[in-house]
Amino acid sequence: MAGIELPHPVTGELFGSPVPPGTGWPGDPATPATPVARTARQVERLAALAGSVAELDAAVSVCRACPRLVHWRETVATEGKRASFADQPYWGRPGPGFGDRKPVILVVGLAPAANGTNRTGRMFTGDRSGDWIYAALHRAGYASEPTSTHSGDGQSLTGVRIVAAVRCAPPGNKPDPTERHTCGLWLDRDLALAAPGLRSLLALGAIAWDATLASARRLGWAVPRPRPRFTHGAQASLITPADRPIRLLGSYHVSQQNTFTGRLTQTMLDEVLARL
Ligand code: SF4
């Protein structure tokens, strides 16, 4: 149930929480007719059927294949809002990919934040992690704006698309192995669709690194052995079945835990982005 309607912070249009598909939320890729995956098998089937990034984003954004995460994202969106956002509607759905639909760089994050993407409907948007990654992408010339505060704010990316290992906000930011595997099936399709024009992948954190390598292997890409280990600045060369080399780079995740403590600095992030 979408419940009480509240105004979108940018457009002022009224929305319930979670936001019903195709009701005018800025950037909503789905319509009421978009097919809904309710099991891992259905994720696999619908991902394979997605012939374009637009179709993939639409299918991802209405997915209900992980019961624990569906319950969590919708509970946060209804009863669990942060007090400072209580006057806003919450997206309450999986975060679709955001950015250039023909990317040369694919950024893979961990998972949406409960009061970030789960509220705004855009990857890394509306929280401190987003402040970091969009500012860095802006400094590197990929983002039109240095901030990403909400869907509909005018932010756009050129050459870069942002996705995640898991597309629903998980309790404690910890998706379980089954959820990671199921959502990895969407990531497989993202990699496959991007591959013909892709130059680099940026994995933010160890979970994204592992998810990206697992997807690459499932797609039949050549992955170095032994398996490349994640660390900040790690680099590996992957080869697609079309013999296309793709550079995989790792960066510490832009989480507050890392940025507040100085484990990840702006300079460290900028240096990795410069190698993409
Ligand atoms: S985590 Fe991924 S697979 Fe699971 S419900 Fe969300 S979008 Fe679907």
Image (cartoon, grey):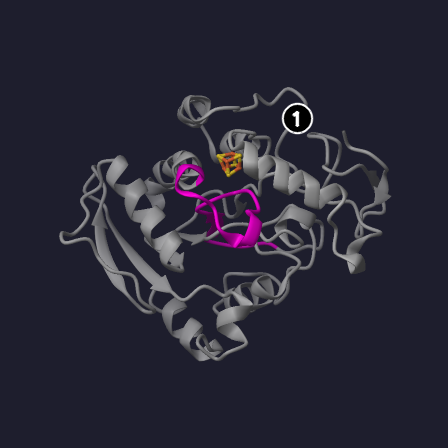
Q: Is residue 163 magenta?
A: yes
Magenta stretch?
A: 156-179
Number of labels in the image equals: 1
User: Who is closer to the viewer here, 264 or 276?
Assistant: 264
Amino acid carrying label 1: it is Thr
- Residue 93 rendering spot, x and y as whole percentages: 63, 38
Question: Do we see residue 81 in this rendering?
Answer: yes
- Residue 91 rendering spot, x and y as whole percentages: 69, 42
- Residue 141 rendering spot, x and y as whole percentages: 50, 66
> Which class describes the residues within 10 Å of circle 1: few (<14), some (14-19), or many (20+)?
some
User: Who is closer to the viewer here, 266 or 84?
Assistant: 84
Q: Is residue 166 magenta?
A: yes
User: Who is closer to the viewer here, 180 or 153?
Assistant: 180
Question: Do we see residue 91 in this rendering?
Answer: no
Examine the image and state in which quarter residue 264 appears: bottom left
Q: Can you tell me whether the CB of the residue at mark 1 lies under 8 Å from the nearest atom of ligand 1? A: no
Image quadrant where one finds the N terminus: top right
Image quadrant where one finds the C terminus: bottom left
Seen at 55% across and 69% down, the residue is: 256
20 up-or-down from 231: above or below: above
Q: Is residue 259 left or right of residue 27?
A: left
Q: Is residue 102 left or right of residue 135?
A: left
- Residue 12 rendering spot, x and y as whole percentages: 85, 47
Seen at 62% across and 41% down, the residue is: 72
Q: Is residue 71 left or right of residue 52?
A: right
Seen at 36% across and 37% down, the residue is: 188
Seen at 69% across and 49% down, the residue is: 119
Read off the residue under disc 1.
31
Examine the image and state in which quarter residue 233 appears: bottom left
Report helix, strand or loop for mark 1: loop
Q: Is residue 35 left or right of residue 51?
A: right
